[in-house]
Image (tube, rainbow, N blue to C red):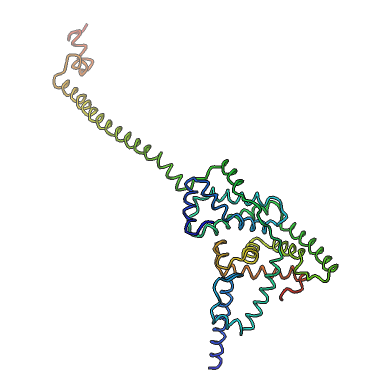
Amino acid sequence: MVAADDEQAWICRARDGDPEAYGVLVERYQQRIFRLVAKWLGPDRAGIEDVTQDVFVRAYMALDTFRGEASFSTWLTRIALNRCRDEHRRAMSRRALQEAFARESAAVLESAAQTLEEPPDASEETGRLVHLAVASLPDKLRQVVTLKDLEGYSYEEVSRILQCKVGTVKSRHARAREKLRCLLAPYVPSLPP
Amino acid sequence: MLNLLSRVFRSENRMDCEAFRAWIDQAGAEPVEPMPLALRQHGDTCVACQTWQQSEATWGRLFAAVPQASLAHSLWPGVRARLAHVAPVASLSDELTALGRLLVPALALLVLCLAGVGWWSGLDAQTTQFDVQETRLTPTLLVANPPVELAFLRQDPDTILQQWGGSEAP
């Protein structure tokens, strides 16, 4: 594990062309970036590892542009989000995602009707449904929900990653929640009004 | 007065709500430090914040149901293999430095060339001036002491004919 104080030293060494120093940074952040990529692309999607590796390769190539104004983690997350967005645009359009959401939600309703004893918001189908609902949001809203609700970042951290004001993040978050509520309310009865 | 007091109270209460929610937002799911007493008291008494907390907990359960993926092995060998095929892209400052390494000697050479050309032009100008002076002197000398040919050229044709054939008519 790399202490926060040592991180800058590893970055400097990596920048000077020592790939093993960069390896230490990869080991430190790979789990977090992998999880973020998986949440963006969907856990079933092939190529999550490939995209995550590509994030680290891109970060290495752009290491000279890292000025240390934000933390390395924030900078890396920003690169990962951009890479995910590119990958996602290439793979699936928003319309395709909305269609997938419609198909999946029908399956959830059917499943809920068959197994009435299981609360719908705890089931695996609901989880998939929530993921699809988040994926069908516009990119700006989706980024905020992914970072804030799925990854647990605070508003301030999200604002640093997305390089916008905290107020903007809060407003996008509220809009995203409202859209999610509209999408999920028919399938998740316990959702607050 | 009562109206003003109630507005102040409402404003303070809103501040407490904001502080309470901001603290929870910053602390995340597993806070390291305990919540300050004032905020805890606010959370115990404020109905709006309690409703907000319940709503957040429901959303939290929903988002927790989203399937998680975890990495089984290190990505570093794969990343290292990819890095072997790509060279780090130089930044703008690096490119400027590299350009500077070429530009400085080139500029120095250019300055030397220009200085050399200037010096040579100066010499050449001086030489040309001497040449001009010499060429300007020649006609003066010629006029002062004209040779036979020049005197011949300066005469009019009738005079020349007279010199050749004499003054007598043929």
Q: Is B119 placed left or right of A40 in the picture? A: left
Q: Position of residue B66 (x, y in %)?
A: 71, 63
How many numbered dots are placed on residues in this image?
Answer: 0
Decide if residue A81 is in sight here: no
Considering depth in this image, is B13 or B104 the residue closer to the camera? B13
Which image quadrant is residue A88 in?
bottom right
Which image quadrant is residue A179 in?
bottom right
Residue at the extreme bottom? B1
Quadrant placement of the N terminus of chain A: bottom right
Instruction: Tell me which residue sits at (83%, 71%) in the image.
Output: A116
Residue at the extreme top? B170
Considering depth in this image, is B155 or B39 the residue closer to the camera? B39
Residue at the extreme right? A114
Instruction: Tell me which residue sits at (64%, 81%) in the image.
Output: B48
Q: Is B17 placed left or right of A132 in the picture? A: left
Which image quadrant is residue A127 in?
bottom right
Considering only vertical position in the picture, is B33 above or below B153? below
Q: Position of residue A48 (x, y in %)?
A: 67, 52
Considering depth in this image, is A176 or B154 the residue closer to the camera? A176
Quadrant placement of the C terminus of chain A: bottom right
Decide if residue B70 is in sight here: yes
Instruction: Tell me which residue sits at (82%, 71%) in the image.
Output: A117
Q: Position of residue B72 (x, y in %)?
A: 66, 53
Q: Position of residue A166 (x, y in %)?
A: 56, 68
Considering only vertical position in the picture, is B122 above or below B92? above
